């Protein structure tokens, strides 16, 4: 059974920091690209940051320089360090694991989400 369990969300004032964690089980973690998505009220879910199997990272422009994604393959965990948080970062943050199977199709798993609220 595949599980992605997020933690670390909460309430923080503008300018503050939070560190999200996502612990994976039931998958061969090393083979998966890991992503963090977020969804604000009445908005579409968006990809915030991703990290490939060789630790190449990518970010959306709005978090570049403020957020850092990392992974620890020994702990099957991906992290999202969020600094200089802004009210517009308020959203439910979701962990996503994605891999391409032998037929070329993408297989993806999702966590349950963790709420991040940034006050002004």
Image: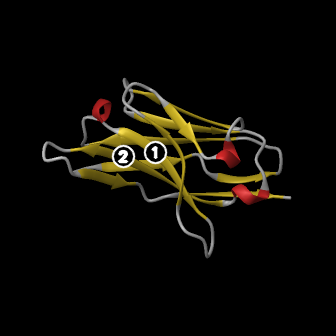
Cβ atoms at labels 2 and 1 below 8 Å apart: yes
Q: 81 or 49: nearer the eye? A: 49
Which residue matches tag 2?
A: 97
Q: Residue at x 37, y 32 (%)?
A: 76
Residue to which mark 1 is pinned: 35
User: Which colour assignment does the render follow?
Assistant: secondary structure
Residue 117, label in figure:
none
Instruction: Tell me which residue sits at (79%, 43%) in the image.
Output: 16
Q: Position of residue 78 (x, y in %)?
A: 46, 36
> Along the line of sight, which residue is nearer the eye, 79 or 36?
36
Q: Relative to 79, does residue 8 appear above or below in the rendering?
A: below
Residue name at image x 25 percent, y 35 percent: 28
Q: Nearer the viewer, residue 68 or 18?
A: 68
Give residue 44's position: percent from left, percent from top. 55, 68
Question: Count of labels shown?
Answer: 2
- Residue 49, position in %: x, y? 54, 43
Q: Extreme right residue here?
A: 120
Q: Left or right? Give the position of 9 relative to 94.
A: right
Q: Position of residue 70 (x, y in %)?
A: 52, 30
Give the alpha-carbon distance from disc 2 to disc 1, as whole Å.
6 Å
Q: Residue at x 52, y 63 (%)?
A: 45
Please tell me whether mark 2 sits on a helix, a strand or a loop: strand
As helix, strand or loop, the secondary structure at mark 1 comes to: strand
Q: Residues within 10 Å of mark 2 (few under 14, many from 20)?
A: many
Residue that sits furthest to the left in the current view: 103
The C terminus, quarter of image: bottom right
Q: Is residue 44 above or below residue 31?
A: below
Packing grade of label 1 (10 A; few <14, some 14-19, many >=20) is many
Relative horizontal placement of residue 87, taking residue 96 as reference (left or right): right
Q: Earlier in the sequence, mark 2 or mark 1?
A: 1
């Amino acid at each position: 059974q595949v599980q992605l369990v997020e933690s670390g969300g909460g309430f923080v004032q503008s300018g503050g920091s939070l560190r999200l964690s996502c612990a994976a089980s039931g998958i061969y973690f090393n083979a998966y690209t890991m992503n963090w998505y977020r969804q604000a009220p009445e908005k579409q879910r968006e990809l915030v940051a991703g990290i490939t199997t060789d630790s190449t990272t990518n970010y959306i422009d709005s978090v570049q320089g403020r957020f850092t994604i990392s992974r620890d393959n020994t702990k099957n965990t991906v992290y999202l360090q969020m600094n200089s948080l802004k009210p517009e970062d308020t959203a439910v943050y979701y962990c996503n694991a994605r891999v391409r199977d032998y037929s070329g199709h993408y297989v993806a798993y999702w966590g349950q989400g963790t709420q991040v609220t940034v006050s002004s």
